[in-house]
Image (cartoon, rainbow, N blue to C red):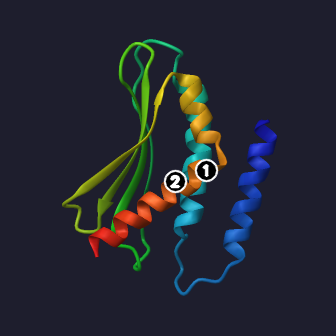
Amino acid sequence: MKTIQLNKFTNFVSQIKNQKTAFEVEPLDVNLAKMQFNLTKRLEREIPDFGDFAPVVEAYESKDPTLNISTVKLLCKKLDNKLRSLELYVQDRARVNEYNYVIAQGEKDEILSSVNKNSFFEICKNVINNINEGIK
């Protein structure tokens, strides 16, 4: 299964990179795919089934001049002994406002399941685009 995820990620990144852009920065899609891939690996490794753990954060700084956002973060944190929360944070370009969206809450397996769903990427992208539109 891990090989399949890596192949899906590699194929997706190569498709995105083959698309021409007007500027020399990585598009939102590539960064989100990288964050999703890295987050999955870290959640499997760093989050216990129960008990304390340090929050797991994957983030990137947007260099895209067409977006009104500066930072995008995916954060998994402890709610109680077994429950975890997976959240998306977006900061505006001026770094004044931070917006967050709860993607999933539940036990470790439920969080991992939500990150591995095909809809995870689209949910994150839609939230970021909606926040970006609201900032304009």
Left or right of 54? Residue 25 is right
Query: Where does the image place residue 5, in percent across and percent down from the top left?
Result: 74, 44
User: Which element type, helix, strand or loop, lies under badge 2?
Assistant: helix
Left or right of 79? Residue 119 is right
User: Which element type, helix, strand or loop, lies under badge 1?
Assistant: helix
Query: Where does the image place residue 102, in percent across and percent down from the top left?
Result: 39, 41
Residue under the point 28% across and 68% down? 93
Give residue 33's quadrant in the image: bottom right
Depicted 112 relative to depicted 92: above or below: above
Residue designated by label 1: 119
Residue 61 is at least partly visible in this image: no
Query: Where does the image place residue 104, in percent across and percent down from the top left?
Result: 47, 36
> Can you name the residue that lies furthest to the left here?
96
Amino acid under disc 2: Ile
Depicted 14 relative to depicted 10: above or below: below
Amino acid under disc 1: Ser
- Packing grade of label 1 (10 A; few <14, some 14-19, many >=20) is few
